[in-house]
Image (cartoon, helix red, strand yellow):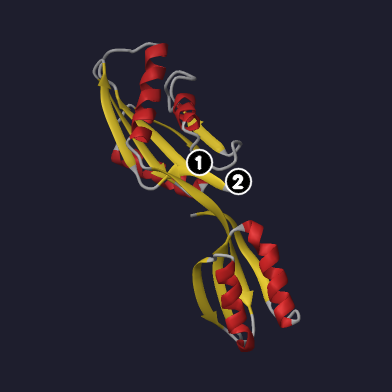
């Protein structure tokens, strides 16, 4: 995807429903490992909570996960996930922590409470649009320094990092649709002596 809707920083929302306390946490994430690490931290923080239900979603709609964490099936995880989809967000994790207040809510109101905890956290967040970049490495001789800098600036490269080995190296981020043209220009100006390698894809800025 060229662009995604996500969030710039963590947010939180809490409320009580018939004595039960619901705390909704929203986090920006980049991968499954980061999501699981944050989950572990929240579970540790709220070790005495009745439930820590969650959902997270990445760019691809098929790359997601959610959990009811012991609540009745369909009342928590999927409702949190639906809140994420309602705002068309990607690369986010929502955890809804519940402290039981002594009164059962019933399936319908329980599902609504988890949905509202997620919606509240999203509404408290700063939603931003991020664009897709690929990380590339350019390997070139000293004779081509000015040419390389000219073309990476032409194609609006970001996070430019100058490195040195036997030859100068530049690591930078560039939009995927510009990579082929950049490569063609650099190969042309150097008679094939400049090499480009894609290091990582789907980095959103």
Going by the image, does 53 lie left or right of 182?
left
Of the residues under marks 1 and 2, which one precedes in the sequence? 2
What element does badge 2 sit on? loop
Going by the image, does 89 lie left or right of 181?
left
x, y percentage for residue 24?
Answer: 34, 32
Q: Which residue is drawn at the image coordinates 39% and 48% (left, top)?
A: 8
x, y percentage for residue 51?
Answer: 36, 28
Q: Which residue is drawn at the image coordinates 56% and 57% (left, top)?
A: 133
Q: Is residue 58 visible?
A: yes
Q: Which residue is mark 1?
A: 90
x, y percentage for residue 164?
Answer: 54, 83
Q: Which residue is mark 2?
A: 1
Residue 16 in the image: above or below residue 187: above
Residue 132 in the image: above or below residue 152: above
Report the front residue among 11 and 41. 11
Circles 1 and 2: CB atoms closer than 8 Å = yes
Report the front residue among 16 and 135. 135
Instruction: Report the mark closest to the observer, 1 or 2.
Output: 2
Q: Is residue 47 visible?
A: no
- How much space separates mark 1 and mark 2, taking CA atoms? 11 Å
What element does badge 1 sit on? loop
Report the front residue among 175 and 78. 175
Going by the image, does 195 lie left or right of 48?
right
How packed is label 1: few (under 14 Cα within 10 Å), some, or many (20 or more)? many
Residue 128 in the image: above or below residue 178: above
Q: Which residue is drawn at the image coordinates 46% and 24% (left, top)?
A: 79
x, y percentage for residue 119?
Answer: 38, 29
How packed is label 2: few (under 14 Cα within 10 Å), some, or many (20 or more)? few
Report the front residue among 149 and 11. 149
Image-quadrant location for residue 102:
top left
């Amino acid at each position: 995807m060229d662009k995604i809707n996500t969030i710039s920083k963590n947010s939180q929302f809490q409320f009580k429903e018939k004595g039960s306390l619901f705390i909704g946490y929203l986090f920006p994430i980049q991968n499954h490992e980061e999501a699981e690490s944050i989950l572990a931290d929240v579970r540790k923080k709220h070790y005495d909570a009745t439930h820590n239900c969650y959902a997270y979603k990445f760019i691809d709609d098929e790359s997601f996960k959610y959990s009811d964490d012991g609540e009745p099936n369909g009342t928590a995880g999927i409702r949190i996930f639906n809140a994420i989809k309602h705002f068309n967000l990607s690369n986010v994790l929502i955890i809804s922590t519940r402290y039981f207040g002594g009164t059962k809510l019933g399936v319908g109101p329980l599902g609504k409470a988890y949905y509202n905890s997620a919606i509240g956290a999203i509404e408290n967040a700063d939603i931003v649009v991020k664009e897709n970049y690929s990380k590339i490495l350019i390997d070139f001789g000293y004779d081509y320094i000015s040419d390389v800098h000219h073309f990476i600036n032409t194609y609006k490269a970001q996070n430019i990092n100058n490195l040195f080995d036997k030859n100068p190296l530049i690591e930078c981020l560039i939009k995927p649709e510009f990579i082929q043209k950049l490569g063609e220009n650099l190969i042309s100006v150097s008679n094939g002596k400049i090499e480009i390698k894609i290091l990582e894809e789907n980095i959103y800025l």
